[in-house]
Image: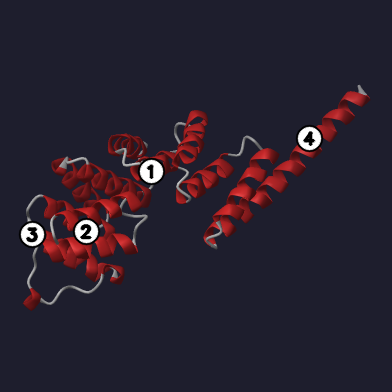
Amino acid sequence: MKLLFFALLCFCSVRAAHADLARDEIDAGYKSSDAEKPRAALQHFDRALRLNPSSLEALYGRGQVRRETADFDGSISDFSEILRRDPQFAEAWLERGKTWSEKTQWNKAIADYSRAIRLKPERDLMIDALVRRGMNRKAAGDLKEARRDMDAAIKLDPNDAASWAGRALVRQASGDVTGAKADSDRAATLDPLYGQSLDASRGWDARTLILRGVLAIGALITILGGWSMLRALIKATKEHGL
């Protein structure tokens, strides 16, 4: 009996030590990611998972870094494993949606954003999911539903610049140039990253709107859908001679 107790105590001590070491590796992984050192970040998250295979946080961090390094299949795999274990993890639905968007799998991204929204997360996450779903619906050609998403995001927080910028792009795609200008001006007022409002004397047309939209997305690329959408917008400006 004493031997069994001693063995159990040793097992628990080793497990606790591994958990502590995994925690250190996770923290180091996020620090490396913030310092734009993705290779080091991946190594830290890999070590964390070897020490603690049940760590959803390590999977989450690795999934993000894998997406940043264009390992989209690896990223999908990590977030899918998280969701297999915890289907109520709203942030994981959002993150996997981002990766589907990077793969230009608009409908799969929309489905994941919708799952995140149905979980009724806190307000900032809800707005993020609505704006992202709206941008993917726009990319998929569903402008009516894209507009509804942007309207819903603005209703939740009228001071969220990304929501106004997103709706500007949807309005522009719908041919509502005047409304697009008003929304883009509002976004620029709320957040200087969107640039200063164009001088009224310069006028407003599809070309300036699209270019300004590309600039806004370049500045807040993670908010408005990822590099795939930026590439699509740049391609559109070239194809239409803008």
Give the vertical position of 136 relative to 194 (above or below). Answer: above
Please rate how many residues cluster around mark 2, counting C-alpha atoms within 10 Å: few if below 14, some from 14 to 19, many from 20. Answer: many
Split into 4 quadrants, where in the image is the C terminus? bottom left
Mark 1, other Cα within 10 Å: few <14 / some 14–19 / many ≥20: some
Observer-nearest of 27 and 123: 27
Q: Amino acid at mark 3?
A: Val
> In the drawing, what numbered circle is on residue 121?
1
Label 3 belongs to which residue?
A: 177
Q: What residue does disc 2 label?
A: 164
Instruction: Report the amino acid beneath label 4.
Output: Cys
Residue lying at 91% horizontally and 21% vertically, measured from the top left = 1
In space, the residues marked 2 and 1 are separated at their CA atoms by: 21 Å
User: Disc 3 or disc 2, which is closer to the eye?
Assistant: 3
- Position of residue 120 measured from the top left corner of the image (x, y, whole percent): 35, 40
Dot 4 alpha-carbon crowd within 10 angstroms: few under 14, some 14 to 19, many 20 or more: few
Q: Nearer the viewer, mark 4 or mark 2?
A: 2
Which is in the foreground here, disc 3 or disc 1? 3
Q: Is residue 226 visible?
A: no
> Dot 3: what SS?
helix
Identify the amino acid type marked 1: Pro
- State yes or no: discs 2 and 1 in contact (Cβ < 8 Å): no
Residue 168 quadrant: bottom left
The residue shown at (53%, 47%) is 61
In this figure, which residue is indicated by the disc labeled 4? 12
